[in-house]
Image: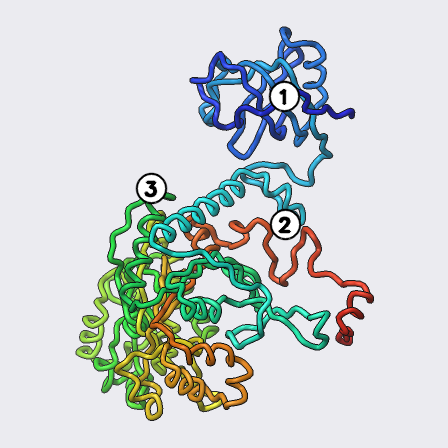
Amino acid sequence: MQLDRMGNLRRTSYCGVLRESEIGKEVVVAGWVQRRRDLGQIIFIDLRDRTGIVQLAFDDKTDREVFAKAESVRSEYVLMAKGMVRERSSKNADLPTGNIEIEVTDIKVLGSAETPPFEILPDSDANEELRLRYRYLDLRREPLQNNIMLRHRIAKVTRDYFDENGFIEIETPMMIKSTPEGARDYLVPSRIHKGSFFALPQSPQMYKQILMLSGFDRYIQLARCFRDEDLRADRQPEFTQIDLEMSFVDVDDILTLIEGFMKRLFKEVLGKDIVTPLPRLTFNEAMEKYGSDKPDTRFDMTITDVSDVVANCGFGVFADTVKNGGTVRVINAKNAASVYTRKEIDKLTEHAKGIGAKGLAFIRWAEETPNCSFAKFMSEDEMSALMSAANCEKGDVVIFVADRKKTVLSVLGALRLEMAKKLGIIPKDTYNLLWITEFPFFEYNEETGKYDAMHHPFTAPMDECLQYLDTDPEKVYAKAYDLVLNGVELSSGSIRISDPDLQHKMFEALGMGEEEIKEKFGFLVDAYRYGAPPHGGMGIGLDRLVMQLLGSDSLRDVIAFPKVSNSSELMSGAPSFVDKQQLDDLGIGIILPKE
């Protein structure tokens, strides 16, 4: 097909914004053909751009050459059309432009198209792998375009808010020194310095602290970050972080600022008001109540400790667990007996075993009397006390786990979410934000018998805990905080260490010797010698934030060109092999694993 040049046509309007107020106005629109309906003497073309669809009309009054072009176009052809906006005789209430159409007087075919491998529809039934392979077609679909435009809107609100609050946007390097950050680095070989490597940043952590030492007291960046780790629905090897740092602040200053940002964001993007200040739970409170440091608080079903009630009961599993320093805890799924039959409880038990439990005990009260998996070992008074402690009523299902505290809380936290989803009690269109604060500084590693740091080495311990650094690591808590939305961690941050002596002590507490400290963090240690202000900050996952606001289940829905589970990008075929000359220039040889 011979394609037309645009000639003197210039787009005057987007397709989806035209309304009845434009009737009688001459417009020029451009876009892709969603579909063509040929009724013989009348042709209708639905033209689509990123704002929506408008109907183009061709009839017996249309110039014959223009009509012939309309007959020739097919789905996904690129057109530019000129004409008069008029009232539509057969209106479409499902379209914002459904009351009008364009009576076309001129049309240009700017691009022809082969039949696409799947139809460009809002609700495509094509499998995800196919859509990702042809991502440029997938991105033409309305839902994905709306997602990307919402992401843009969130980024704009972010920049506006922090600019108004005195923050300076500063770009940090993309090729940096490899330092321990918790995940594997993506490495970039140096051609000039053969055998040496840059790393892609897992975060701009050290650079933003350097900026605080440089006198830029409020830094912001929509930073690209990279982590070479296994993927899942809410994780990608490259992601964007709303990264910020502030000087001369404490925890409350940072949390208050971020609450203001969230309030602004929800109002401008979703039209929703959120109440501030946000709720706060310490790490220990969150674990005790919800079994998670990122709890979903949109529903109840909290964890109850019944250890004291069963410490001397007749059921040996419970009594022995408490005697040996363990704990017995429960969650009560109210009115769940009709859904959680004995068969479903057996499935839940198998699930619990798969995540660390030895088994489950239960009370299911569906009939006149409750069915209890351990009732024969209990006296009537013991059962009565336990039922009361668990607030068990007719219709309820109560799940018990007995084990070490860490295992019990982890398992019940996971079962709480699993049961809530099955019961359908998690409300939609509800956004529960909360802070988790006062995280443990160290975590005991049972394999090594040592305490590992739970945070990066620049996180400050709480002042009252400094006395326990050398003697009792379990009593040391960090000036660290997470922002959680509907059970998803949106951001993590902390007050940083600004005392060089304390920073050195923390490196030593993490098992680093002088050589390792100098090799990995020498430039930062040196900078601290020249006056470091107290500072702190955080990083907010932009991708996760957009995903949560959209109610999406996958980061791939909010990233233009995402990776799949094996860290490859299906559309371009990355990663790929490079030619020998490129490797020789870098002084690199490839050793492939034996099959």
Residue 271, numbered circle: 3
Can the viewer see residue 416 in this picture?
no
Measured Cα–Cα span from mark 1 to mark 3: 38 Å
Q: Do the residues bearing badges 1 and 2 touch, measured as CB atoms within 8 Å?
A: no
| Residue placed under numbered mark 1 in the picture | 9
| Residue placed under numbered mark 2 in the picture | 132
Q: Amino acid at mark 1?
A: Leu
Circle 1 packing at 10 Å, graded few (<14), some (14-19), many (20+), is some
Q: Amino acid at mark 2?
A: Leu
Q: Which structural element holds mark 1?
A: loop
In front of the other: label 2 or label 3?
3
Q: Quadrant of the N terminus?
A: top right
Depth check, front residue: 301 or 184: 184
Residue 220, numbered circle: none
Measured Cα–Cα span from mark 2 to mark 3: 32 Å
Q: Who comes first in sequence, dot 1 or dot 2?
A: 1
